[in-house]
Structures are given as structure tokens and as C-alpha cells.
Image: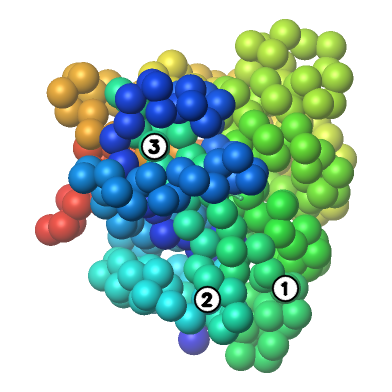
Amino acid sequence: MSYPLVCLGNPLLDLQVDVESDFLRKYDLKDNDAILAEEKHLPIYGEVLQNKSLQLLAGGAAQNTARGAQYILPENSVVYFGAVGKDVYAEKLTEANTKYGLKTQYQVLEEQSTGKCAALIYNHHRSLVTDLGAANHFKASHLQKPENWEFVSNAKYFYIGGFHFTVSPEAIQLLGKHAAETNKVFAINFSAPFIPQFFKDPLDAAIPYTDFVIANESEAAAYAESHSLDLAPTDVVGIAKHIAQLPKVNSARSRTVVFTQGTEPTVVVTTVDGELVVKEYAIRELSADQVVDTNGAGDAFASGFMASLVLGEDVSKAVSRGQWAASVSIQCVGPAFPFPKVEY
Ligand code: 26A
């Protein structure tokens, strides 16, 4: 079986609820962030289960991107790897993935429970608090099993959710090396500010394999800070230029850095024949009443972007498809796309 796009990440079930700012303050949370749950956050999961607005939704950043890319692409285009338990949460994920036609090759860990993410919606913001559970135990050796490596060796594009740097940098290295050695496309997403901040070393070790780096403005700022760049944290173009020029293993492909900035234009920096080319693309505007929630907006952008690359389109089209996918997903509850399907 030949699926052009392989994605790797942490499969999670989102427990999405509407909250007031008091709730966020009580747990010391920002309006818009993504963190790993500490001891003090654990009561959140009990509280959200009591909340009348609770919705159980398939989540996990790279899994959202994988589902979204499969939504756009022809059947049998995307396969997703990650670790889950053997429980009703995993069944919920499988149900959603089946609806989108996403192929999963989960590592199933019977002793662990499937990971969960409290997605706390406050106005147009979302604060994500994750208990990784089984997802935290994914092993690179799962990819190396012959039945899984076949998907890897047949793929042409790889997409890694940055959140996976907290789990298996080894698996990311394995795929990055394979992509570079076989001249395939390797893309990563920073996923959250805490990745460049606290997982700097595994991130830096993966950058040389990347052909595409996707992130948002707050992740770019966190990168600049943790790498002590002599740039303002708001200088997204400068930060993108810096990353675009970092050493690269596969010199047959140039590196492109894509920074989304919420409602501000998407910044793209590419190296063409050693020269840096900077482009900015205005987003698709939505009126306030069209915005349902922004949970998964960045993942949806990455779905459209990656699907476009798989379709053989150029970077400007990929950004445009990404922006379209984000605007579609923002109009849905949680990290989802509408059925019946809408087309770009
Ligand atoms: C390691 N962490 C913290 C995470 C995540 C995560 N996915 C993987 N690892 N924290 C939140 N998410 C997912 O991000 C999506 C929105 O972009 C949530 O499950 C949510 O669906």
C-alpha cells in the first residue's frame, strides 16, 4: 500500500468545554496556550466531565492535521502513527479517523490509557491542557516493524507534530534521516511555545532534516528567545530567515519557513539558490459570528499546506489552501471539518 503522506504525533481525545476566565485563572492558565498537565492541573479533567458544554472530539495536533489532509486528498493518501491505549477513548478516535478515511497504524499499549486534552474555550481563545497517557510511550521501534516501515518507505512526504519532541525524538530522527537519504519531503510544526523553549535540543537536532518548518508567531518568538537570537521576538521575518539558513542535510531541497500569525498575514521565507525570498500572504477574513472556536486552527492550516504539497502545488498555493482549511475548521466545533465535504 502506498500512502504519500506519513504523519507522526500524539493521539489525544479532546475534552472540549466553554469556560470563563475565572476557571483559567484558578489553574494558572493563559487564554491561549498548550501545556502538559502538572499535578495542580489534574482536577481539571474531573471538572470538565461535569461541565454541560462538554464535547468529546478527536484531537492530537498532528492527528488533526493528518485527518484534515486526508479530508482534502484522494482516498488512501495519509497514514498516521502514534500510541493509544485499548479503551473507549481510542475507539472514539478510530471512529473519527474512519469517517475521514484516515489510516492509522497505532502502537496499542494495553496497560496505558489513551491521552486526553482539556480544550478550554474562552471567547476566541483556547487553552489546551494535556495528559499524554499512552501517547507518551510511543517508541521508534514501532516504526521499524516491517508492516509499518513499508508505509514509511513508500511515502513521499513526512509531517511531524512538534509536540512529539516531548515523546520520541528518536522516532523523529529516524524519519528525518530516511527523508534526507531518499530525497523525500520532511516537514515539522513547532506546535507550541514550550517546544522551542524546553525541547530545544531535540528540536535543533531535527532542524537539519527539515524542508518545511511551520509555526505561529508565539512559537517563533519562543524560538528566538530560547536561541538567544539578536532579534525582537516580534520580528517574525528575521526569525524565519534565521531558521531558513540553518544547516541542511539534504542539499537537493531548499528549506521553507512558514509562520502563521492569527489574523495577520502568513510569512513565508524560502531559500532560492542561496538567496532568501520573503513573501507575505493575507489571510481569509471571517466575521466574529463565523468563528465557532479556534481549537485546531493551526493544525488545519498545516493540513491544507501538506495536502497541497502532496498534490504537487507550489508554496503560494499551499499557503492559500492552508488558510482556506483553517478558515473552514474555525467554523466547526473543535479540530474538525464539515460533512458533507466542502471543496477549496
Ligand atoms: C504534548 N502535548 C501537550 C500535545 C498536545 C496536543 N497534541 C499533541 N501533544 N496538546 C494539545 N494538543 C492538541 O492540539 C490540538 C489543537 O491544536 C489537542 O488535542 C488539540 O486537538
Quadrant location of residue 59?
bottom left
Q: Position of residue 289 (x, y in %)?
A: 15, 23
Q: Circle 3 is placed at which residue position?
A: 120
What residue do we see at 38% from left, 21% from top? 21
* Neighbours of disc 1 within 10 Å: few (<14), some (14-19), many (20+): some
Is disc 3 placed on a helix, strand or loop? strand
* Neighbours of disc 3 within 10 Å: few (<14), some (14-19), many (20+): many
How many numbered circles are shown? 3
What residue do we see at 53% from left, 71% from top? 113
Nearest to the observer: residue 293 or residue 229: 293
- Ligand 1 within 8 Å, label 1 CB: no
What residue do we see at 68% from left, 69% from top? 137
Taking 176 as reference, is 123 left or right? left
* Number of the label disc, if any, that sits on residue 139: 1
Residue 323 makes an appearance in the image = no
Per the model, the C-alpha gap separating discs 2 and 1 is 14 Å
Which badge, 3 or 2, is on the more N-terminal residue?
Answer: 2
* Above or below: residue 120 compared with residue 147: above
Q: Are marks 3 and 2 in contact (CB under 8 Å)?
A: no
Nearest to the observer: residue 307 or residue 334: 334
Q: Position of residue 275 (x, y in %)?
A: 75, 26
Which badge, 2 or 1, is on the more N-terminal residue?
Answer: 2
What residue do we see at 75% from left, 80% from top? 141
What is the three-letter code of the residue carrying label 2?
Answer: Gly
Nearest to the observer: residue 161 or residue 42: 42
Residue depth check, mark 2 versus mark 1: number of the one nearer the observer: 2
What is the three-letter code of the residue carrying label 1?
Answer: Lys
* Number of the label disc, if any, that sits on residue 85: 2
Quadrant location of residue 111?
bottom right
